[in-house]
Every structure is written in structure tokens, then in C-alpha cells.
Image (spheres, rainbow, N blue to C red):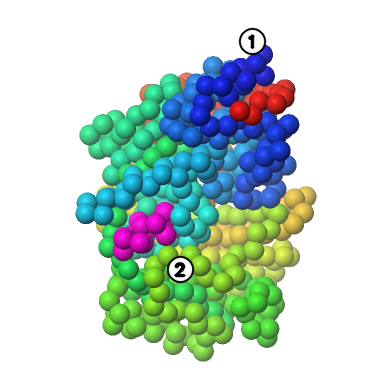
């Protein structure tokens, strides 16, 4: 039976929809966040309506030797959310959220976005900490870690996971937690999408109504940038902060005289008592006369509603790495590098860790870098994909200047999926444990469109091929 006929049968056996090139909605359904990957054309996009649908799609892909990618938010920096010729499993219809206000837990469907989840739980005065972007899928960010506005107070997103519903490569729908499939539960908390399709997550919720938070823009001198990072390191666990140094773009919320100048764009969230917040945020305000001060007491979800936001270039080159210090000399090196960049948009960003992140044992989850001080992101955004080599060289050279301590990366930000690079995310025995789990649950490496952890017996590049799918009208 042809793949076309099989797709027709699949469409008849699921509650969701199968979209192919002949469907009007196909182009929209295959879109992902980074524009350079939107030229890819999956053989079909399957919009699942349930875990049962997901199971059928997984079995279909496995039995037909098709590559399978999964997406909800579609924010993969390496385009892992899309494919040429294989199947794209779209979770965006899975939007259920069951909140237990008394028990302070929630079962969340895998297609929810961080902003959607946060807005809904905030109606009860409850939160789970995600990242800094509302359009990121909750599943993708959680499986890799979850560093954002509340990580120093509440830990990584994955530290709030109590259980999950996972469809494994055999098509089985499994409910997992510390007691049921504990090794698989350990692996999905940090090991990415290597082990199955997560269709639901069971989260702990935390009481939080308002925060002191927002954006503050300061002049970017080496002393100001380094002192901002130092204040964030030494503050209480209530404060999580992101320091981004960049040339100010002509955005409407920035004063015109700032456009084209290097600035420190800080995003601050303080989730503690007002008197502590005023004191610790005040230290940041006193670094220099702010060019813009948007920090105020707000409902927590409003932190996702800052005016403006990052530009979205067609192509991005970046390196993300752990580092154990960021001195005045490092800040000066960062400023020098930015002044030398030829990209339309270049950013060097520092996210301070510590706090609740560091209080979890390194072997408790597959995120093993609990003792690292900070994550540094070096990002170059540009329009012409052919210019990538030039900007890659700048990114690599800048990383070499700024990294301190052992090599290590945060997998959600990692722009390299070669095995040596992926191993940097999983040091020592963590890698070996993940390989064991992968071998047990996905021996054929069906779930390989990711920062791949190959099962025993397969080379790191032994991923499921994506044969061309010649398809016609198959939409239900």
C-alpha cells in the first residue's frame, strides 16, 4: 500500500486532521518561529486532537519509516520542529488545563503555550515558572529545563513537574512519575524530546499574585553591565534577572537619542515582599540614570506583555554556554565584540542562576548543571542565510572570550546538535543514564529530530530517514 493511501487511512482513524500541500491550511500549519526553516515542506502535518491520535501518528511513522517531528510553539533554534518530507506532529490543538486550586497542581495539555498557561493559572493567584517568551510551548521548554523569570525562587520549570503523560515509540500512552516508569520520568526532565511525545504535564503550582518587574534600560559601560550581573548574583532568591547588551534598535518605546547606541536592556522580576523588592531593585536603578524604567508592581502575567520585544530576523546564529564569572573585563570584551559585529542584530545576554536551581541535587534530574553560576548567550541575527559563516565566526570567537569554567551548555538554547556538542549538556554519568533510557524506550531512534541521544547500537547520525511523501488531498 502506498504512503498516500496510508495517509488517507490515518486521516480516517484520528479525530484530528491531516494537512498536505493541497490543503489551504497546510502553509500556515507548517510554520515555525524562525523564518529560515519555513521553506521546509513536511510530507504532512498532523494536528492531533488527543493522546490517542498521537499514538496512532507515532505508530504510523514508525511502521512507514518516516521521520517524525513534534511542535507546539515551534521555537527550536535548529529547526527541529519541522522537516522536509516526513511527518510534522502538531500539538497546538491540545489546550486542556485542569487546575486543582486546593491542591495547587495542574494537568496541562502539551499544546499549551507558556503565556496561555500563565494567564489561566494567574486567575487563581497561582503560577508555574516558565521562560521569558509567552509563545514558547510549555512542553519544549520543560523537557529541556526552563530558565526564566522565576527560576531562582522556584527552580527550573522541570523542578515543578510531578508527572507526565507520554506516548513512547511503541505507541503506548504512559502515565509516569516518581513511582511509575521512574527512569523515564527522570530522563524527560532535562533530556529533551528524545523519549516520546509528552501530551500532558502535571505541574506543581505556587502562590504568587504580583511581582515587581519589567524592563530597565541603562547605558552599557563595562562597569554598569558587570555590576548589574553582580547585583543579580548577590540578591535574594526572589530576584531573577536577564542582562542583555545590544545596539538599541529603533523601537518606539526607546528614546530616539538612544537608537544606534549600545544599551543594557535588563529584565527584572522580583517575587518577594515589597520592602525587599524596593531595596534590591533599587540597587539596579542606582547603577545609572535609566534611559527607560519600566519596573513596577504588576500582576505576574503582565511580565509577558512588555511593549516591543525582540526582533525576529530571518536567520540566527548563536552560542549558549555556562560560565562561572562575568567580570568588568568580560563586560568590556562583550562590548568590544558587539561594536565589531556586522550583523543587523547582535546581543550578548547573561542569565544569573543559583538560588532554587542550585539546591536540587545534580543527579535528581537529567539537568546536571546545578552548580553553574550563569548562562551566557551570544546571538547574531541576520537576514541573508548565505551570510551565516561570517556571523558564526563572530559568535564562536566571542564565546571563547567570555566562557569561564568547564564546558557545559543548556540544551534549550544550544545551537549545535552534533553528538560531542550534545554531550556538553549531559556530563559524566548523566549521558550514560540517558542512553540506557533511550535504548529501552526508543531503540530505533524514532524520536531523533532533537538534540539527539542515540540508543546503544546506533551511531549518533543514525536517524530515521525521511522518504519523500507524494501526497494529494487527505484532509478529513
Residue shown at the point (61%, 33%) measured from the top left: 45
Residue 462 visible (yes or no): no
Q: Quadrant of residue 298?
A: bottom left
Label 1 crowd bin: few (<14), some (14–19), many (20+), radius 10 Å: few
In the displayed structure, would residue 120 be above or below residue 87?
A: below
Residue 446 placed where, x, y %? Answer: 51, 26
The range drawn in magenta is 117-131
Q: Which mark is residue 303?
A: 2
Residue shown at the point (39%, 70%) measured from the top left: 299
| Viewer-closest of 95 and 469 | 95
Residue shown at the point (61%, 28%) measured from the top left: 476
Residue 168 placed where, x, y %? Answer: 42, 27
Residue shown at the point (21%, 54%) measured from the top left: 102
Q: Which mark is residue 1?
A: 1
Question: Left or right: where does residue 186 sit relative to residue 52?
Answer: left
Residue 251 placed where, x, y %? Answer: 66, 74
Amino acid at each position: 500500500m502506498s504512503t498516500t493511501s496510508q495517509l488517507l487511512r490515518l486521516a480516517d482513524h484520528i479525530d484530528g486532521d491531516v494537512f498536505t500541500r493541497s490543503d489551504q491550511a497546510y502553509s500556515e500549519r507548517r510554520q515555525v518561529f524562525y523564518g529560515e526553516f519555513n521553506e521546509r515542506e513536511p510530507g504532512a502535518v498532523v494536528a492531533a486532537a488527543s493522546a490517542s491520535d498521537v499514538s496512532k501518528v507515532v505508530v504510523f511513522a514508525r511502521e512507514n519509516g518516516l521521520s517524525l517531528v513534534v511542535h507546539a510553539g515551534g521555537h527550536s533554534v535548529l529547526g527541529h520542529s519541522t522537516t522536509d518530507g516526513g511527518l510534522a506532529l502538531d500539538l497546538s490543538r491540545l489546550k486542556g488545563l485542569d487546575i486543582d486550586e486546593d491542591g495547587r497542581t495542574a494537568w496541562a495539555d502539551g499544546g499549551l503555550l507558556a503565556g496561555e498557561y500563565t494567564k489561566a493559572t494567574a486567575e487563581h493567584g497561582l503560577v508555574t515558572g516558565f521562560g521569558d517568551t509567552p509563545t514558547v510551548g510549555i512542553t519544549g521548554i520543560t523537557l529541556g529545563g526552563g530558565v526564566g523569570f522565576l527560576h531562582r525562587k522556584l527552580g527550573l520549570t522541570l523542578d515543578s513537574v510531578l508527572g507526565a503523560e507520554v506516548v513512547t515509540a511503541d505507541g503506548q500512552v504512559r502515565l509516569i512519575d516518581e513511582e511509575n516508569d521512574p527512569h523515564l520520568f527522570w530522563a524527560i526532565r532535562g533530556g529533551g524530546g528524545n523519549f516520546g511525545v509528552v501530551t500532558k504535564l502535571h505541574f506543581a503550582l505556587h502562590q504568587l499574585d504580583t511581582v515587581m518587574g519589567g524592563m530597565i534600560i541603562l547605558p552599557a559601560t563595562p562597569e554598569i553591565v558587570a555590576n548589574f550581573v553582580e547585583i543579580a548574583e548577590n540578591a535574594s532568591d526572589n530576584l531573577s534577572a536577564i542582562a542583555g547588551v545590544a545596539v538599541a534598535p529603533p523601537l518606539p518605546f526607546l528614546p530616539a537619542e538612544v537608537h544606534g547606541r549600545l544599551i543594557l536592556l535588563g529584565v527584572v522580576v522580583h517575587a518577594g515582599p515589597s520592602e525587599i523588592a524596593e531595596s534590591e531593585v533599587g540597587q539596579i536603578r542606582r547603577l545609572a540614570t535609566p534611559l527607560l524604567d519600566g519596573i513596577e508592581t504588576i500582576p505576574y502575567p503582565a511580565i509577558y506583555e512588555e511593549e516591543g520585544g525582540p526582533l525576529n530576523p530571518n536567520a540566527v546564529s548563536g552560542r549558549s554556554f555556562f560560565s562561572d564569572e562575568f567580570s568588568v573585563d568580560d563586560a568590556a570584551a562583550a562590548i568590544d565584540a558587539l561594536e565589531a559585529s556586522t550583523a543587523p542584530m547582535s546581543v550578548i545576554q547573561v542569565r544569573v542562576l543559583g538560588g532554587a536551581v542550585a539546591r536540587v541535587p545534580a543527579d535528581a534530574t537529567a539537568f546536571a548543571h546545578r552548580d553553574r553560576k550563569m548562562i551566557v548567550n551570544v546571538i547574531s541575527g541576520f537576514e541573508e542565510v548565505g551570510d551565516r559563516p561570517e556571523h558564526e565566526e563572530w559568535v564562536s570567537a566571542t564565546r571563547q572570550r567570555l566562557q569561564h569554567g568547564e564546558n557545559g551548555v543548556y540544551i534549550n538554547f544550544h545551537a549545535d546538535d552534533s553528538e560531542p556538542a550534545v554531550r556538553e549538556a549531559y556530563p559524566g554519568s548523566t549521558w550514560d543514564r540517558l542512553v540506557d533510557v533511550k535504548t529501552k524506550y526508543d531503540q530505533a531512534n524514532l524520536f531523533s529530530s532533537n538534540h539527539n541521544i542515540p540508543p546503544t547500537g546506533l551511531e549518533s547520525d543514525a536517524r530515521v530517514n525521511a522518504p519523500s511523501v507524494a501526497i494529494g488531498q487527505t484532509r478529513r
